[in-house]
Amino acid sequence: MLEKALHGGKIYWIWVLVLLAGIGIGLSAYLYQLREGLWVTGMSRNVSWGFYISQFTFLVGVAASVLMVVLPLYLHNFKAFGQIVALGQFLTVGALIMSLLFIFSDVGMPMRIFNVPLYPTPWSMLFYDTVFLPGFLMLNLIIGWVALGAEKRDVPPARWLRVLICVSIPWAVVMHTVTAFIFAGTPGRGFWMTAIMAPRFLVTAFAAGPALLIILSTLLKAVARFQVGEAAIQKLITIMFYALIIDAFFLGVEYYTAFYSHVPAYTETFRYLFFGIGKNRALVPWYWAMNGAIVAAIALLALPGTRNSRPRLLATCIIALAGLWIDKGFVLVPAAFIPNVFGRVTEYPPSWVELTLSAGIYCLGTLVITALYKVAVSVRRERMENPPGSTSPAERPGAGQVPLFR
Amino acid sequence: MTLSRRKFLKAVATSTLAVAVIPGDSQGFELKGRMSPSPKALKAKRWGMVVDMSRCRDDCAGDCIAACHEVHNVPFIPEPDHEVMWLFQEPYANAFPDQSHGLVARRSDGWKFLLMCNHCNDPPCVRACPTQATFKREEDGIVMMDYHRCIGCRFCMAACPYGSRSFNFRDPRPFIKKINPDYPTRRKGVVEKCNFCQERLEVGRMPACVEACKEGVLTFGDLDDPASEVSRLLSEKPHTRRKPDLGTGPSVYYIL
Amino acid sequence: MFNRRWVISGIIIFAAAAAFPFYWHAVGPHAPFPELELPTKEKKCIESVEYMRTNHMRLLDVWRNAVVRDNLFIYTASDGKQYEMNLHRTCMGCHKSRERFCKRCHDYNDVAPPCWDCHFAPSEVRKTRSAGTGTGTGKSNVHPVARKGEPS
């Protein structure tokens, strides 16, 4: 089926070329960083983790969010998700490839990265990430691909696929919880060491994923005339809505605990984020924007007209995604180092190297997603145009997706 | 010959996998000789450092830091963002941010404290490290760095509540003024920190900072030995440790 | 067979390209076997020449883990003599020059072990000494306490 990614119209190839150019520029930034050392980034002895780890965190969340599509379809027989589940799974594949590349770009000795699987360390959360991420990548790639292949041949997928689907469900939760545990287990960083870190990670993932899927589905409908079905979009909106509400509640709970307790270990970083400390205010506008975006997205979704107005829905999804990205993909990681363990403030501006390299990695992930989406869209379009049996596939939106329990 | 593309790809993948799992040649290597520990090594059940701040003079030139950094080829990087420090000074308010208040020590310079890796009893950095590049030696409590294994992920730096660790953001060699050829440097991309002069203890010598200090500020010894100098000091004088409420069990004590 | 011309000629070209290195080695000029500057002090290494030639990298690997991770120090060779497991003092103590000993075989075999990123060869130390960027006083390794960023 991969050959379908190699045939496309002019727009497709122009898009691929743009992405390839982006990858090339990112690669040259990476080679520069490799040669010079990580001093070309904005990271410092005080803020030792920055933009790369932030992107890794956000993208693992996007990857785990496929659960929001897989669970209703396979466990609860919500057939409306039949067409979109492949999009979710392929989005996961791209997101995980990017996550792993971000980790690779961040470590000081990337040529030694195999030391992690060679010397397994079961008490280290970072070790578990190197197990869970590639595993989830393979799971979703195989499940999505095999299901798509079965759909192409108009046969139910092999029975062993059901086992993989069953495994992928808790895997998603554990994978993102372990990512949260990287941060939540560190003593001395009050901003991170909170029990609500793992719940917040999951809930922000479950909001970001559907938002992204809605945007991508709209894009595919415009560019490739590919429909996932209005019922799927509506359900995704509901999921996103409640996930955002729960996230807002969790944030509120965090703010209360920090500010009411007056314990400096917990308040200082939030004080820096909301009001700045002394002259250091770089993240203040970002943090207010993030909180504003979450609230605005909830308000927009609560209004009756948003669900049915595609432009308003898209705007809402973009606002929500912006807020969620600022939260996990920009603020969360560096803020724990501010103030540092000595009580000093060292701010962290990402350097052009970091931003260029990150853009390159995003281009690579987008290329993977583009290719996989092209395959999915082409397979389904061919089925639409040459229906294999008497019943048109459009009438069976769940075709090829096996329910787990008949 | 009806070989489908799919069958061909499967055959290639399977044969690649089969070849890839053939074990490498280093499996068959047998060491001809035997290895043993150093007979001259200083031994302790738990090494600890007592820093007597009442003896530490403000106008001291910092012989301890100079000695440590010279012996271990620690680079001097002028950019504060990328500095590498094994032994360093911080004012009291920064060394003990959880205990500082306006009335603390009415010394004009803010009372500079000598800080280093605390070689904790329950080190969070060891729990964090995904490759066991940093590990705690059970026989004497020193938290070691294996620079050959470190992948430079800096998780240990995030986990350390004391800011003891430094990352080599750039190649350190141009920044080392005087090379000590008896000790290696590190390279860009690995994390480093004070190692309680493990290589000197091995040959029966005291840590470089302890030997260099002429005021007797630093005392190094076995915390688990009631007859050691450090135990005596700790039993006689009131002392504190950095952030003890975190449960890390630091081995560096400060007499105020 | 479809496209018989292209397939057969493609196979021939590929076979020729793959076989070329073997042909070149048979008839072409050979790189001379490296001439190593042998140590003057000692006549014997810690083990036999054949063993060291084949296994010195594995030996150093074992030593590395033993010294750093297992707190070992002394190596008792197969002939009973004891040596310190120390690249600089034991190995480079006799093989003083990296350029005229280690590097020659490594270059011949196109091997670039990363040991030298951190470890020193005596001949190198003289070079690195002059390349340091000093900043004036001898105590410049002591860091000034004041630095950027405000206390909270």
Image: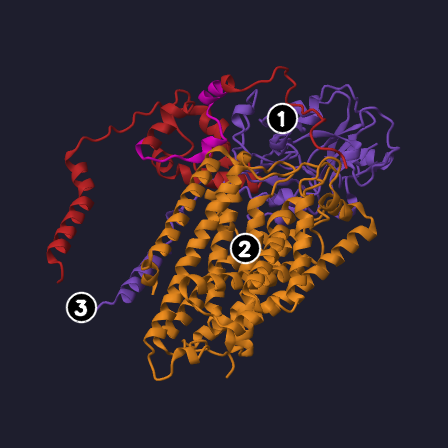
Chain colours: A orange, B purple, C red
Quadrant in the picture for residue C25: top left
Q: Mark 2 is on which residue type?
A: Leu
Q: Quadrant of residue C34?
A: top left
* Quadrant location, the N terminus of chain C: bottom left
Q: Choose between B30 and A168: the one closer to the eye.
A: A168
Discs 1, 2: same chain: no
Q: Looking at the image, do the residues carrying marks 3 and 2 touch, with CB atoms under 8 Å apart?
A: no
Q: Which residue occupies the extreme top position in the image?
A: C136
Disc 2 packing (10 Å; few <14; some 14–19; many ≥20): many
**Which chain is indicated by disc 3?**
B
Name the disc covering residue B1, or none: 3
Name the amino acid, label 1.
His
Mark number displayed over residue A88? none
Q: Position of residue B127 (x, y in %)?
A: 64, 50
At numbered mark 1, what does the secondary structure look like: helix, strand or loop?
A: helix
Lateral position of residue A378 relative to residue A109, left or right: left
Location of mark 1 (residue):
B69
- Residues in magenta? C108-128
Between C76 and B104, the one nearer to me in the picture: B104
Residue that mark 2 sits on: A59
Q: Nearer the viewer, residue A236 or A142?
A: A236
Residue furthest to the right:
B103
Frontmost of labels 3 and 2 is: 2
Count how many numbered circles sit on residues in the image.
3
Instruction: Name the subunit of mark 2.
Output: A
